[in-house]
Amino acid sequence: MKMRKDILNIAVIISGIDEEYQSTILKGVQKCAEELNINISHFIAFGGILHNQKHDIGEFNIYNLVNYERFDGVILITNVISSPEITEQIVQKVKKAGIPAVSIDNDLDKSMYHIGIDNKKAMKEIVKHIVEVHNVKTVNYVSGPSDNPESILRFEAYKEVLAEHNIPFEEERVHHGFFRAVDGRNAVFEFVNSELPFPEAIICANDAMAIAVITTLTSLGKEVPEDVLVTGFDNVYNARNYYPEITSVQRPLFESGYKACQKIYNHIMGINQPRSEILETTPVYAQSCGCHSKMSDDIGGFKKENYYLMDMYNRHISLVNRMSCSLAESESIEENINNLKSFIMEIECEKFFLCMCENWTGKKTERNNTSYVSTSNMFRADNYLINGYTEFVDVPLVYCDNNFGFLEGFETSLMLPDLYADTSKSKLYYFVPIHFRERALGYCVICNSKFPLESPLFHTWIMNISNSLENIRKLMCLEDVLSEIDKLYVIDPLSFIYNRNGFNRNTDELFLECIREKRPAMIMFADMDKMKYINDTFGHKEGDCAIKSMADAISSACMHGEICARFGGDEFIIFAAGYNDEQAESLRNLINKNIDTYNEQSGKPYNIKASIGWHIDIPTKNTKLASMVTIADQKMYNVKKGKLKNGTPR
C-alpha cells in the first residue's frame, strides 16, 4: 500500500445539483471525503434547465475551467449532462490527464472505473410486474433522452418485456422526453390525442415524469390507478411521498457516491479493486400501480421534513428576492461588490471567491506584470469568450476568515490557489460559472457551505450575480459610448483638438474666474496662410494634412493650461488666463518654431504658415467672450493684411 499525502484533491463533474438524484450522490461522495480527509471540488453547470441554447453554452463552459492534471482523481456524473458532445470532450480530457476516474451510472470508457446499476434488469422487473401481476395488455412508455445510456437501457427493457409477453410494440405509444417533468405532461396530451386506444398503464423512465403524468391525468379527469396505472424510476422523496405513492425503483444513490470516492482513494493507495461495480436496486410496488402503500417515510417524519423544506424555501425566496433588488440598484462594479457582501454572509460559507475574466467588461486588455492595461477605449460586442476563460482572472471579491477583501489576479490554469493551501481538514469547493447567455464573465467558488447542495434556489442565487454583473457591464459600455459621442461633439475629428463646441464648454468657467478674480484673459487667433494654394495645387488630402500639422504645432505649444481649438476651416483659437503680452508673444514664437520644425522635417512640397494675432483684457461682468474673440480676429487679420502688402499669397 502506498503512503498518501496529507490532502487529496478530487474533482466532481456534474450538472443540476438541485435534483435529488444528483444531491444524494454528492452527499455520499462528501461523506467518504470527510472520513478520508479529501478535498472535493464540484464543477457545476445547470444546463438544459432554461431551454435556452446560448445559456447552456455559458453553463457548460465551467467544464473548460477544469485542469485535470492538478487533481488526484475525478468523479464523473455525466448522465445528467444534456450534451453528448460536452460529455465526450470531458472524457477525452480526463484520459489525456491520466488520472484515476470513476463514472457513476454511465460506463464511459474501459480505462475508467464504473459504479452503476443494472438499468435493464430493474426496469424489466417493473414492466413485468405491470404486465404479469396487473394483467395489462396496452402499455405506453415515456422515455428519457434517446442518446442517454441509462435511458436507452430502460427503453430496451420495456420493449423486451413486451416481446416476451407477445404484446406488439407500437412506436406511437412512446413519447421521447428528457427526464423532465414537462415531458410527462406533454406525453399525456400526446397519448390522449392519439388515434390508438388509451393505455392501461404508462411506464415512465424516471419519477419526475411519472408525477407529471399523474398530475396531468388527474386534471383531465382520469384517476390513477383506477383508470390507468403509472410507474416511475429512482424512488425519489417526492415519489415516495406523493399521492398516490409512485411505484418505482429504489437506487443506491448515496452508496454510489460513497463508493466512487472510495475507489479513487483505493487506487491512489494501491489497493486492488474491480473496475466496474454493479449495485443492487429494489423495486418498490406502491399505490400508483394498484399495490399497497409502502409509506417509506412515516407521517411524523414527512410532516417535519415538509415543514423544514417549506421554511427553507421561504427563507431562500426572500434571500434571492432581496438580493435581486439590491444588486439591480448597483451602478458600478464597486457598488455591486459592496451590495453582494451581505448575501454572501447569508449563505454561511467559509470562503467565497469571485473570479472575473480579464475582458469581462468587453474592453480588450493586456496583462503587464500583475496589472491589466486597457488597449481599447471602446467596448466591443465581439470581445468576449465563449469557450474557456482568459489566461488570467482577477479576483475583485474574496470572503475568508470572516473578512472581505480582494486578491491579485492569478493564472486561470490554477483554478483557485486556495485548493493547494496547506490544511489539516478537508474542504468542499463549488465552482459555478458567471456568464450572460454564452458570454463568459468569470466564475465563483464557494467553500464549505450547505447552501449549494440544499437550496433549490442556488442556481437563481448565482444567476442574480451573473445578471447584475452583466447590467454593470452594459452600464459601463453605455458610459463609454456616451463619452465617445461627447467627444464627437467637442473634439474636431481631423485635428483631434477641441472644436468650437469644446472651446466654448472649456473656456466658460475659466473666463468667469478671470472676471471674479480680475485676472487678464487672452484670446489668440491663428489663420493659416496659403491654404487655398495648398488645396488647389496639391489636393484636399494634403490640405487636411496641413491643417492637422498646424493643430499639432499649436497644441504642442500649449503647455501651461492654455485651451486651443480648431474654430473652423483653417482657423485656430487659443484661450489663456493670467497672460500678459510678453507671454502671448512667447507663445506665438513657440508656435512658429514648431511650424518651422515641421516644415524642415515634413518633406512636403509646400510650407505651412499662420498669421497670429491676440487680444488681452481684464474682463468685467459686462465683457463678452465673443467680443474678445472678434477683437483678436481683427488683430490677426491686420497681421495677415501686412503679409499681403509684402506680397505673401494667401
Image (cartoon, grey):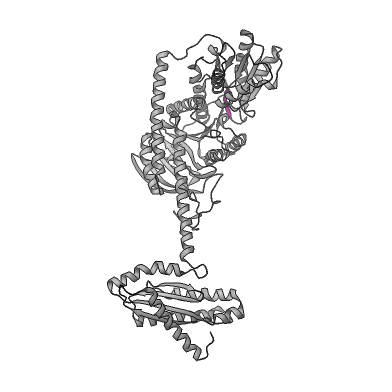
- Location of residue 279 by image quarter: top right
Q: Residue furthest bottom?
A: 646
Q: Which residues are magenta?
A: 111-116
Q: Tell me the residue at 67%/11% (across/down).
A: 137
Residue 112, relative to residue 299: is it above or below? below
Q: Residue furthest front?
A: 622
Horizontal arrangement in the rendering, residue 210 relative to residue 586 (left or right) = right
Q: Residue 620 or 422: which is nearer the viewer?
A: 620
Q: Residue 346 or 177: which is nearer the viewer?
A: 177
Horizontal arrangement in the rendering, residue 637 relative to residue 49 (left or right) = left
Residue 421 drawn at (x, y percent): 41, 40
Horizontal arrangement in the rendering, residue 464 relative to residue 106 (left or right) = left
Q: Residue 614 or 359: which is nearer the viewer?
A: 614
Residue 122 drawn at (x, y percent): 60, 17
Residue 71, relative to residue 194: is it above or below? below
Q: Please tell me whether residue 112 belongs to the stretch shown in magenta.
A: yes
Residue 121 drawn at (x, y percent): 62, 17
Q: Tell me the residue at 58%/76% (across/down).
A: 542
- Location of residue 234 by image quarter: top right
Residue 409 drawn at (x, y percent): 44, 49
- Location of residue 353 by image quarter: top left
**What is the magenta segment's predominant secondary structure?**
strand
Q: Residue furthest left?
A: 517
Say whether residue 416 is visible.
no
Q: Please tell me whether residue 271 belongs to the stretch shown in magenta.
A: no
Q: Tell me the residue at 40%/17% (across/down).
A: 303
